[in-house]
């Protein structure tokens, strides 16, 4: 067997695979003997048909399979040995190969067309992108600090409702006579006194105890949005609900907010050694910024990738790629349909793939299985913060590892995880190369930029 190649251009080449009788004869003979022992031929007992007949019946197809196996094993070995980084896969050139007669030929020559992957050079000096982050408003930080103080505060169940308490009980719709309305609303309500919009009604609720009752107009007290959600009504019905309700108190709860002190700081951020309220607020603000961190990363990566695409200057062997795509398509794509979609749909995708290949030479941005398993394990660990009966910390880690490995084995489960890890690795690569300035803007302006980015996709 002999393999040679001819360079048709800088990127396109033709490969010739020559196979002679010595390359396949031994294996073909072995298979013919096996067929002779197993074949049932009319007029002969099983395994007793003459070899000449077996050769006439089976030799051409056996030769075809053997020759194809030789090509498959050696063609790609040749590409690896020669370090030829090809696009797609070689395409058979049927015109040059001609008609193959396995019944009459002994020596064969097969021709294949191939294209080399173009070298993509990335010039980072032509890329300019800003890392845009959301500037968290002071009021949002204030609200989050208050929420944290409540979360770590003292929980009580007082006998009497005070302003700021959480009240729960049963609300029954009344008719115009003040009696429970037949077929009317009857729901369990849970709300904070601050949710009561009407001051007079709020004053009526403050001071109540368990089993006390109070009558008030629900729409006046809460508004239609609250009624729609808590009375389980359609929006239109909630807006028309003007009935009084009788509310029976089942109980109330009270949370005394935790003081802004070092005990709270250490509970919320145990690794940061925060001692002052202003530093605590800054740490809270950073956590709030992380909520939009993924979208910020996506926006930055998209900006860079768009510029990489705009600055793409490598030559693409389009004629070969069109032939290859048509050969791979299972939906009977026509050449005309491919031409119509080529520039708008196919070329950008091809360029992205080539750019990703160049990026991976700088730093591997493809998620590994270990990274996927570790990512899943972190998620499982966050949602499983206890030890099972008799389980040690080491046993738990082994259990999480096995569960994560099982989940990662199904590609349907990991699609979003792979995308997320790839995004993070691409972001880190771009950030290392560009060292972008950070621009903090309002949520409104950030959303406008995200919208504009999506419209450009």
Image (cartoon, rainbow, N blue to C red):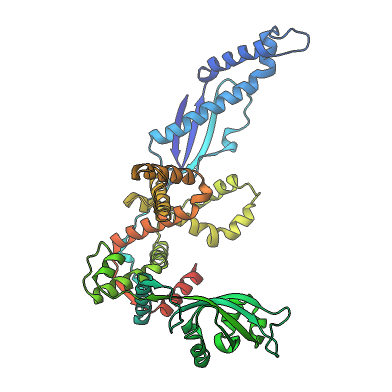
Determine the residue located farthest toward the bottom in the rendered image.
Answer: 200
Question: Does 115 sit left or right of 142 as displayed?
Answer: right
Q: Is residue 406 above or below residue 208?
A: above
Q: Exactly how many numbered labels are in the figure?
A: 0
Residue located at (36% from left, 54% from top): 359
Q: Is residue 366 above or below residue 435?
A: above
> In this orientation, which residue lies closer to the viewer: 194 or 410?
194
> In this orientation, which residue lies closer to the viewer: 91 or 394?
394
Question: Does 189 sit left or right of 266 as displayed?
Answer: right
Q: Is residue 35 above or below residue 159?
A: above
Residue located at (45% from left, 52% from top): 418
The x and y percentages for residue 417 are: 45, 54
Q: Is residue 190 visible?
A: no
Question: Does 314 sit left or right of 43 as displayed?
Answer: left
Q: Is residue 228 above or below residue 127?
A: below
Q: Is residue 193 visible?
A: yes
Residue located at (29% from left, 65% from top): 267
The x and y percentages for residue 105 are: 60, 21
The x and y percentages for residue 257 are: 35, 76
The x and y percentages for residue 388 are: 42, 46
């Amino acid at each position: 067997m002999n393999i040679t190649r001819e360079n048709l251009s800088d990127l396109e080449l033709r490969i010739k695979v020559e196979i002679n009788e010595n390359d396949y004869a031994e294996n073909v003979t072995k298979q013919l003997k096996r067929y002779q022992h197993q074949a049932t031929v009319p007029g002969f007992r099983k395994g007793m048909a003459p070899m000449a007949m077996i050769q006439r019946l089976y030799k051409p197809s056996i030769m075809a399979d053997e020759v194809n196996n030789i090509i498959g094993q050696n063609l790609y070995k040749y590409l690896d040995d020669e370090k030829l980084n090809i696009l797609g896969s070689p395409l058979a050139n049927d015109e040059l190969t001609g008609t193959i007669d396995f019944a009459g030929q002994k020596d064969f020559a097969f021709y294949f067309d191939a294209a080399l992957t173009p070298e993509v050079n990335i010039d980072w000096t032509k890329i300019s992108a800003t890392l845009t982050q959301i500037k968290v408003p002071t009021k949002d930080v204030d609200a989050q600090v208050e929420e944290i103080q409540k979360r770590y505060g003292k929980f009580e169940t007082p006998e009497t409702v005070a302003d700021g308490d959480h009240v729960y009980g049963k609300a029954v719709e009344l008719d115009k006579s003040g009696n429970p309305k037949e077929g009317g609303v009857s729901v369990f309500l849970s709300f904070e006194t601050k949710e009561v919009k009407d001051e007079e009604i709020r004053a009526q609720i403050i001071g109540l105890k368990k089993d006390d009752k109070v009558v008030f107009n629900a729409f006046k007290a809460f508004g239609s949005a609250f009624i729609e959600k808590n009375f389980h009504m359609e929006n239109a019905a909630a807006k028309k609900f003007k009935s009084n309700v009788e509310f029976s108190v089942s109980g109330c709860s009270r949370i005394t907010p935790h003081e802004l002190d070092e005990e709270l700081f250490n509970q919320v951020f145990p690794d940061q050694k925060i001692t002052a309220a202003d530093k605590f607020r800054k740490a809270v603000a950073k956590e709030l910024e992380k909520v939009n961190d993924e979208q910020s990363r996506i926006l930055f990566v998209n900006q860079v990738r768009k510029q990489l695409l705009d600055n793409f200057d490598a030559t693409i062997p389009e004629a070969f790629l069109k032939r290859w795509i048509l050969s791979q398509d299972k939906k009977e794509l026509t050449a005309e349909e491919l031409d119509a979609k080529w520039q708008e749909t196919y070329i950008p995708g091809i360029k992205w793939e080539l750019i990703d290949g160049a990026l991976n030479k700088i730093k591997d941005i493809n998620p590994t299985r270990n990274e996927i398993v570790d990512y899943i394990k972190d998620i499982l660990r966050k949602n499983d913060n206890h030890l099972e009966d008799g389980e040690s910390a080491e046993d738990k880690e082994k259990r999480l590892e096995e569960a994560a490995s099982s989940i990662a084995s199904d590609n349907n489960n990991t699609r979003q995880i792979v995308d997320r890890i790839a995004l993070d690795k691409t972001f880190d690569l771009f950030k290392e190369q560009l060292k972008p300035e950070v621009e903090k803007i309002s949520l409104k302006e950030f959303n406008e930029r995200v919208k504009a980015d999506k419209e450009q996709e």
